Structures are given as C-alpha cells and as structure tokens.
Image (cartoon, rainbow, N blue to C red):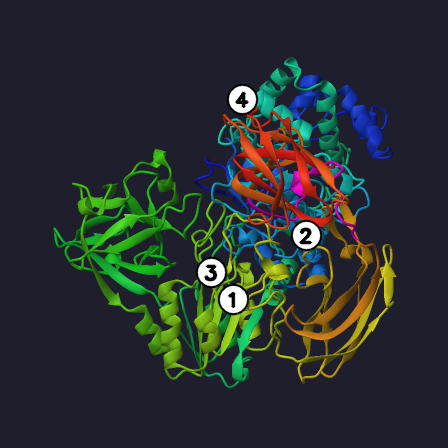
Amino acid sequence: MSTWSRFRRIAAPAPLVLALTFQPSGSSASDMLPFQDPDLSIEVRVSDLLGRLTLDEKLSLLHQFQPAIPRLGIPDFKAGTEALHGVAWSTDRDNAGAVVTATGTVFPQAIGLATTWNPELIRQVGEAVGDEVRGYHALAPRVWGLQVWAPVVNLLRDPRWGRNEEGYSEDPLLSGVIATAYGRGLEGDDPLYLKTAPVIKHYLANNNEIRRDTTSSNLRPRVKHEYDELAFKIPIAADAVTGVMTSYNLVNGRPATVNPDVGDVVRSWTQKTLYNVSDAWAPTNLTGSQQYFATNEEGFAAALLAGVDSFTVDNNNSAPTIEILQSALAQGLLTEEDVDASVEHVLSVRLRLGDFDPEGGPYAGIGPEVIDSPAHRQLARRAADEAMVLLENRRRLLPLDPSATRRIAVVGPLADTLYTDWYSGALPYRVTPLDGIRERLSGATVLSSEGVDRIVLRDVASGRYVTAGADEDGDVLRVSAASAGPTEEFDVFDWGQGIVTLRSAANGKVVDRFNFGPNFANRAAQPYDWFVQQQFVLERQSDGTHVIRYAGYEKAFDWAGPEVYLTIAEDGALALTATDAADAARFEVDVVRSGVDEAVRAATGADAAVVVVGSMPFINGREDHDRTTMALAEGQSALVRAVLAANPRTILVVETSYPMTLQWEKFHVPAVLWTTHAGQETGHAISDVLFGDHNPAGRLTQTWYRSADDLPELLDYDIIKARRTYLYFDGEPLYPFGYGLSYSTFGYDNLQLGARSVQAGDPISVRVDVTNTSPRAGDEVVQLYSRQPSSRDPQPAKQLRAFRRIHLAPGERRTVELEFAASDLAHWDVTRSRWVLEAAGVELMVGSSSADIRRRTTVRVRGERIPARDLARETRAIDFDDYAGIELVDESKEWGDAVGATAGGWLRFSDVELGSGASHFSGGFARAEAGEALVEIRLDDPARGKVVGTAVVPSTGDVYAYATAAAELDGAQGRHDVYLVFRGAARLSTFAID
C-alpha cells in the first residue's frame, strides 16, 4: 500500500489511558439480537445482520473506513494495519487518514524472517505481532484496525525489485510455508475467532515498481499455476490468511483490481470466507493511469464483481465510494445481490474478530502491556540470530574468541546505526553492531569509525561556508560562516551511483528538504518518507569545484518542477532554484577528516576488524523504486578494500534487503556475514554470531548472482523461458539458493525411501541420517529437492519439496524424515489445460543447499504420459509451448486471456498429431488496426518450416471485437511442431486445425 499524501508520519504518542471500547447496544441476554449471540453459527449470525442492514448501510461497509451503525450497536471498523515484520503503522480516521507509526517490537525484515527456514519460530513471531496489534487496538481502536495487511508472498524472482525486503523467497513452497506460519501466528489458535485477520499481498505477479500501475505481467499458464499462484495458494488453503489484496499491475493485460480469479480461483482454495481488498487508490487507476474503464461506476462495479470486497481509496472518506456504488446500482452495473455477496464476506471476518460479540471475543482482553514486552524483545533477538547467514569463513576466522580479542575495530557506515524501512515501525530501542560488540567485549578496546568523509562546503563566490543549525531541531542551511567549525561540517554517506546523504556534525541530523520548499535543513533522523528528500549528488566540475544536485524522488514528476540544482539566495540560504549545473552555486569540497584513513587507523594492529556496510532501505530500492544495481556502493567498496589491506583478519558484515554482487569480496575477504535490516536487536545478533554465542544457520532464500548481466530484463515474468531463479538458472551463481555456512559440520547418510513407486494420492517420504560431525552444537537445515529428467515439457533443474531445521549436539545423529505429496510433482499440461502427473523416474536429492547435495535416490512415479496435441479441438492460443514477439493480453475486460502478436511474432504448439492430413485452420482474431494481417501456419520451424496455409485476418476495429479467420491447409499431415507466424499485428483467442 502507498499513498501520495503520506509525506510525513505522525508518531503514536505514549498513551496514558486506554481508549474506550465501543459497546454494542442491547448486550443483555434478554434483548440480544441473533447476530450478537456467540452461541449461534457464523452463517446464521451473518445472515441475520445482513437482513437488518439498509442498502446504504451495506455500501458503507465496502470501504476501508467503515462507520459505526449505532442503531444496531455495530462499531466502526478500519481495514488495514501494516504489520509485515512487527506492527508498523496505520492511518488515523480522525486526522484525514494521516499515518500513525507504532513503536513496538521490530523483527527482522520479511526476507530475514524467511532466511531462518524455521516455520515454528515465524509462527511465534506472528503471534507476538498479533498480540501487539491487539494491544494497539486496545489503545486506539479507531486507528489500529484488526485486519492486518501482511504477509507479502510475491515471489522474489528478481533481486532488483524495489520491494525485495517485503517478500520471503524466490521459491513458492518456501514463501508459502513461511507465510502460513506467520499468518497462523497472526490469526491465533482459536478454532473460530481471530486475533487479527491477515490479508496476503499482492495478488498477482507484482514484482516490479517501474510503471507498476501500467505494466502488465505476462504469465503463461505454466508460470501462473506452478509459480506465482502457488505462493498464495499454500497459506490460503491452510486457512492461515483471511483475504488477498489485489496488486497495482496488470496481469495479461487486465488490471489486477478486476482480475476475476480473485473471486473465482482464489476463493476455491478454501472453505473459509475471504475478505479481499484493493491496494491504495488502485480502483481509481482503472479510469486514471490504466484507462481501462470510462467511468468510476464501471470500474468499481467490475472490481466488486471480480471479487474485491473493500475499496482502499480517498483515505478516510468513504462518501465518494458510496456515491459511485449507488450510481453503479442505478445504472444496472450492479445488483443488491452483488453488494450482499461482498458485505457477507466483510461481516463474516468482522464477526470472527469478535466485533459483534458482547464481550468482544476471546482476544478482546489483550492490552497494551504486550507491546515491546520483555518476551517479545527476547524473541526479536532470537529471530535476528537465526536470520544471520554466514557466507564465507576461510581459515575458520570465525567465531572470534572473546577472551583473546582484546582490541577490535568496528567500522563502516552501518556500524553504529540501525535503519528502519517503509513497512517498519519505529524502533523502541537500538542495539547497533558497535553496541553489541562493546557489550560482549566489556573491558576490551573497541575502536570505531563510520568510515565516511567529513567535509565542509565553501562557496566559491563569497568564500563563506555552508552552516547548519546547532540545536536538536536544526535550521535552514545558509552560506554564512567565515570559518569552519562543527556547524559547518557534514558527514557524507555514500549509497552508490553518486547518491549521498549529508549528516550535520552539529546535531547528528540528516539534511532534508524543508517542507517541500526551496530550502534545506538539518532535521531528519534518517532518510525517510515517500519521496526521500534527503538525497543529493555532489557533481564535480571541470575546474575541480562541485555543484549540488538534489535527488529527491519527487523530481521524477512534472508537478515537482524542473529545479534540481542548489543556488544561494540573497539571505544566504541554500535554495533549490536552478535547472542546470551552469546556474548552480559552486562549492569547494574540503575533506576535514578522511573516513577511510580513520577506519584504517582503527583496524591497524587490531586483533580483528569488523566492517559493517550495506544498504539504506529508503534509498537502495523501495516501494515505487526498483534498484538498477546490486553492487556495493563505490565508497563502501573502497572502505572494505582499505581495511582488509590494513588487517588481514577482516570480517565483512553486509546489511541489505536484497542479494548483492559481492564478486571481489567473496574471493578476498576471509569472513562475510549477511543480514537483513534486522530490527532493534541487530547488534546483539551480529555480536552473537561473531563470538560464537549463536552458531549461524540462516540460509539464503534467493539466488545471489555474480552480475546483473546474469538477469533478463526486469519486466520479463517468464521464469521458464528466461531461465530465471534457481529453478531454471543455468549459470554459475555467486551463492546458490539455500546456501549458508555453520561453525559445525554435518554428515548425511543412509537415505531411504518410504516407497520406491508412487502414484497420485500417495505421499513421498524420505528418511536420512544427519550427524553433527563437529565438536560444536549447531543447527542444520536439511533440504529435499526433486528433479524430473524426462518430461514432455521443460522442468526445473531442481525444486524444493520439503525442509527441516534441526538442532544437533556434538556427535549427535538423528534420522530426519521429510515428506511431500506425490501430486506436488504434477505440472500444468498446456495441451489439456489441467494438472498432469507424468510417468517418470524422479530424482530426489537431500543436502544443505540447492548446490550442496549429499545423497540421492530415485522414485518411480506411476503417472500418465501426455499424448500428442490434438489441435482439432478448440485450443486457447495462450496454451502455446513457445513463442517470440508476442505479449499476453485480455480476451475481454471481464474474462479470458489471449495472445497479442506483432509482425514477425510466432507461437509454437509442440508435438501435434495431424494424422493423415488436416485440411482446415480457423481462429478467433481481433485486429484494431486498419487493413489486413496474415497468419502463416508452418511446420517445425517459424522461419524455414513448410507453409501449409495462410489465414487472412481482417480489421475488426477493436481489440475486443473478434472475427473468424480461416485457411485451407495443404501438406499438414503426420506429427509436427506447428507454428503460427504473424505477418501483422493481431490478437488470437482460440483456434483449431482439423
């Protein structure tokens, strides 16, 4: 979720008293209405309440902010509290939807939670977050709603996605299992009632931020069913979530907000009622950026009919939504029965939250005392510990011996700070890496440096220095001082590709654009907010001077104006008034303290040097901004190299939200530890691992590539054809999926199959003995993969089927059993549009990562063989086997997929049985352009194959107007690959060859 008005967050104040809970009227037994009676079934209660509501009251329940209905004792309700890795923020009904930020327990980012590979731990984290949501709800129920918008299961198919930190994995099984654990924790363990109502995000195939509301994710059927849908299906089928949020993007040309699968396919995965919501402002995109409908009435009606039950739009003002829906009813676009269907979904989930119970349900007694409780602090540390991934440990540099470490250097731009992200609450306290190491080594000498340059900026024209405010709140930056002191000094933090932030030495605050005006002030605690108005580029000019370019994200929009360079106003204030460098003020940048030199001095002669580098979550990719590089910032890379040259016992700690291309670091730095931004306990967790108080066992949930050159174009969603993710990538990764080192070593032997031969409906069970072959207790993540070498269709190189994290004492041996269903080996058969379990020998592989396989065996699957294609039956064009020069499009605005081709594009349908001779081709085509297009029917090759017929496609005047184009065939016999080659733009929905 995002909103343009969310420029400044309002922190939730420490409350002194509990908010009053809305009490339903008529709560005594004598006048209790049926919908208020906990002894009645959900269905009876919902039906009773629905029958009592007026149409206008029903419509008021279809918005994020639902008003109270006093005559029935129904309290107001707010959909959507952000709770991705702790309670993050919500929006205030009584303050125009302004954001209120929580200050509760902050756990590691979502990707960090997944790197634990520990579903039971993640369930406990979900329980804690659910408790804290209830705690905040007890304080301010009009702010903190009990429907929470988490978890996120969009698959991390490309590490350049700006929201990589929000997801769990590139693997659908791992994502689904972790989401299920987190969701179950959020829901609680009552068989009927919900602690909170988690809504899973963002359906579907939402994995790019660039033009995210107008780009279409092309999902061929296999990718859709086997990959993108599966991560949603697992937690929904497990009843671990209570709805989906639709995504901003289009899927096969249709906006996800009106994707009919939301009300059809998704609801078929569970017997429970789902309460689905739109993303923020997405309903108005239908008539805005997407231009999909002419009126809001058409768009909102289509969304409701597609399965969306709640409109997240207009902040806290539900009136426009109600008016639009009333108009849609009047126009016959909706019926009251359509409205009732969605209202039933809303009421069912609200009932399970205890909204209509006189006592509020079993979770109503949870109060604010749970927020940032001692138990939750301990859990946050454990989660941060288990999320640590040890990437390198040459010469067994780690763990460090605390008794022998009397002098240590802790350096780097992230050594003494912790950053939050867009979906994070405020940290209740901070344990930085430096704090954690100092605490662990009390009595030792701990030297520190952030390794960043401290500079002064001298105006060339006047000879005076840029001066910041000295107090806590800072002041507007002005060119005023004749000499340089602390108020003239700024620390330069390098985030890569020229982007820097400037922190004032006078008050420790980051320079920030002042209230969207032309001036700047040193007042921000860290880079933050939607437009991240703390970004600058110091551009060196040919004469050695510098100009300052402002790089806040709003400057990508015309409304923000063309001014990007800083000048000096008459009163000396730095001002954003120049459009090009020639008109900007010139500054001499004088380094008063070299960050690299200071870090090198600290590292020289130390028993060890710890360099903490990484990303800034608001700058190096975030919602609305994909990253264009996975490399370490240039200045940070130089720091690592310099410290390593000064001290060969250098340990690199990398804090990022995404995989990095650490080519040089991998092969030169002896020890490398990776963590996400892991919340308030980050420093303790890093120290725990460095000194052996915790034996690392985190495992990567994404492939780490050697270079961005290993990745296809960001918007290419076809992981099969593009050879993307560990499933299909055929290159050499920097670090493979499932990878992570330990201080212990483990042996695998005695792999046994439960059954050598299986069929659909059977379980596949393997047992393997795992032994801790080291003198140190530790955790191992036992991973089971499958590979099907023989198939009609391209199959993954290997695919995760089950895993288990186990703890073993030194020398301990344990038999680990891993099981999955034989039907999980099925894939989508495009020849018959259904799942198929092929007859095949399937290799099963057990190991400690996707690349570290220790034992193998083969199970025989008694399945079926996919017959040759029969194109005499009507075939959907989207069910191709291969393609070029095409995109996937909507057949109509209501339903169906089609193929849109440009001139030269082609579709391949493999292994077609044409028999003794097919004589006729016919297809349903749409062509908006004037004139005709041709479609050649070729055999075996799109360029050199025999042309057996050519269909003439007429202009139909509209992309949704289809007409039949036919051709007589000559020489179409036998068994061949059939190609449809387009000689002109056209859409094709279905065709047949007979």
Q: What's the CA distance linking mark 2 and mark 3?
A: 31 Å
Per the image, the residue denoted by label 3 is: 709
The answer to which of marks 2 and 4 sits earlier in the sequence is: 2
Per the image, the residue denoted by label 2 is: 179
Residue in front for this viewpoint, 345 or 528: 345
Observer-side mark, 3 or 1, equals: 3
Under tag 4, what secondary structure? loop
The answer to which of marks 1 and 2 sits earlier in the sequence is: 2
Residue 706 position in % (x across, y down): 49, 66
Q: What's the CA distance linking mark 1 and mark 2?
A: 26 Å
Per the image, the residue denoted by label 1 is: 683
Observer-side mark, 2 or 4, equals: 4
The residue at the point 59 percent across, 20 percent down is: 297
Residue 277 position in % (x across, y down): 64, 35
Under tag 1, what secondary structure? helix
From the viewer's perspective, tell me whether residue 129 is left or right of residue 320.
right
The answer to which of marks 3 and 4 sits earlier in the sequence is: 4
Can you tell which quarter of the image residue 165 is in?
bottom right
The residue at the point 52 percent across, 61 percent down is: 659
Per the image, the residue denoted by label 4 is: 294
Question: What stretch of residues is rendered in magenta?
Answer: 866-885
Question: Can residue 663 be seen here?
Answer: yes
Residue in front for this viewpoint, 897 or 406: 897
